[in-house]
Image (spheres, helix red, strand yellow):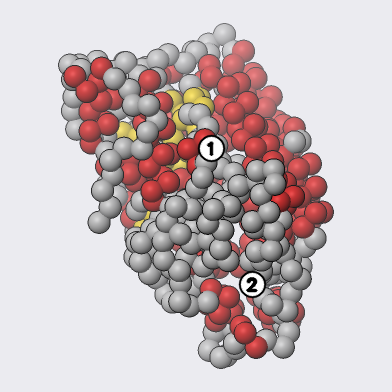
Amino acid sequence: MMLPEATIWLLTLGVGAALAQRAEINDFLKDPNFKKYEKPTKPVKEWIALGDSYSAGTGSNGDGEIAGKDAVRGLRSWAHQMSEDTNRWKEINGEGDTPLFTWSAYTGDRAKELRENQLNDGPFEKESWANRGRAINFGKPQLAAMTIGGNDALLSTLLNDCIYRAWLPGDCQKTITLVKNLVTSDGFADTIAEAMFKVVRFGRDHGGAVPAQSFQLYVLPYINFFNADEGNVACDTVDWRYWSLGDAAPLTLELRKQLNELAQLVNGVIKKEAENLVDLGVIFVGDPNPKYDKHRFCEPDRTTKEMADADTWFWSRYSKTDTTDEGKVASVDDAQRLLDFVFPGKGLQANSLQQLPYDDPEAKRKFPDFDSLLRAASAEDVDAKATPFNLLRSFHPKGTAYIVHKDMFMDAVRSNRKAEGKMSKRCEFVSNNSPSAFLFA
């Protein structure tokens, strides 16, 4: 079993490199030949979405809308919705076609994987994101948009140790303390800054932006999962652990507060590092959290065991996966699906286990920690019924929620460009961050 302490120790092996990168960033900005960011005047002809599952859209809507194989991209992600919003692109560009779209975001990626696997030389390839997880060319974009940092902050470890207790769980409170120490460290901030810096350098070097210093990187933070208002005890007896044999893990008010606070610590680092790199063309989009008010887990007026209703904007482990409907409860127990994935063909029943699944020596060797289990699940054919897609998708926004993210990105792009050409009447206003009219089939 890989304890959280060991996980953090492994992550800190890259801190030295991150510190060196911080020095490189500082040297780059101080170089007499450095060209400070200039607000672009050219229309957007090409753009790219990078990052983790919040940019891949793992939460979008049903296992029939998945692209990119093991990247688990969802067709109702903010990125894909943004790529198809022709009216908003006309507002931004004033004229011309909808920009070419490259989508390299990959479910589960940390900053390290972004740097090493998502920045690939090569010309634009139409819809390469649809049938490939990796090896997608960067092209020549004028801007990039991304989310990054959640996996570096050990989000999946937190969910496993504090909520799911699904696979070799550690002590929740120890994990919370360790993650807090991690995300408040200089090394974590350096890692986030390095990822932003690498993307901008790559973008400037690839010739899409004219002049090169007009290349832009837009970054968005994460969302608080829970209503943790003082006195809200509606969820205090709700327990989402996978195995009845395991320790109880109720969603108490105190736990919800702690997890929300960790999300805000991560967001604070992202915002600070984006603002530190404004001269490079990094733009912090803003905070989507206010738009999620009344749409989180544990809202007191509609808390149930499943919390799979349409007004909750995150997918629950109990949400139905074989439909685009955002308010259906699954008829198949996702614990059973996970059991079938780990022990294929053995006919074990989740409701009558004699031991915890991760106590099986063979299973423990196959999946030595929760992250390895998640990676194996995403590497499988996610359309297969035996794949625990609920486990991958839960705690990600639904397609309706991603409209908010899409609109915030596009409002930011519109506000930070002054495109040449004939500006239509539509260009005379900027939306007030309200979700656009997006019709789902």
Front residue (pair 215, 441): 441
Left or right of residue 57, residue 345 in this image: right
Residue 285, percent from left and from top: 48, 29
**Residue 437, quarter of the rendered image:** top left
- Secondary structure beneath dot 1 equals helix
Number of numbered discs present? 2
- Secondary structure beneath dot 2 equals loop
**To which residue does mark 1 refer?**
289
Left or right of residue 278, residue 172 in this image: right
Left or right of residue 194, residue 188 in this image: right
Q: Are marks 1 and 2 in contact (CB under 8 Å)?
A: no
Depicted 161 relative to depicted 263: above or below: below
**To which residue does mark 2 refer?**
242
Which residue is at a point 69% across and 43% down the rendered structure image? 230
Residue 19, percent from left and from top: 72, 31
Q: Quadrant of the N terminus?
A: bottom right
Look at the image and tell me whether residue 148 can be seen. no
Which residue is at a point 41% across and 26% down the rendered structure image? 412
Residue found farthest to the top: 32
Amino acid carrying label 1: it is Asn
**Residue 92, quarter of the rendered image:** top left
Which residue is at a point 80% across and 54% down the rendered structure image? 173
Look at the image and tell me whether residue 240 can be seen. yes
Residue 72, percent from left and from top: 44, 58
Front residue (pair 406, 320): 320
Instruction: Pick whichever of labels 1 and 2 is earlier in the sequence.
Output: 2
Residue 309's mark? none
Residue 254, percent from left and from top: 74, 50
Q: Residues within 10 Å of mark 1 (few under 14, many from 20)?
A: some
Which residue is at a point 50% across and 47% down the rendered structure image? 295
**Residue 213, quarter of the rendered image:** top left
Depicted 219 relative to depicted 150: above or below: above
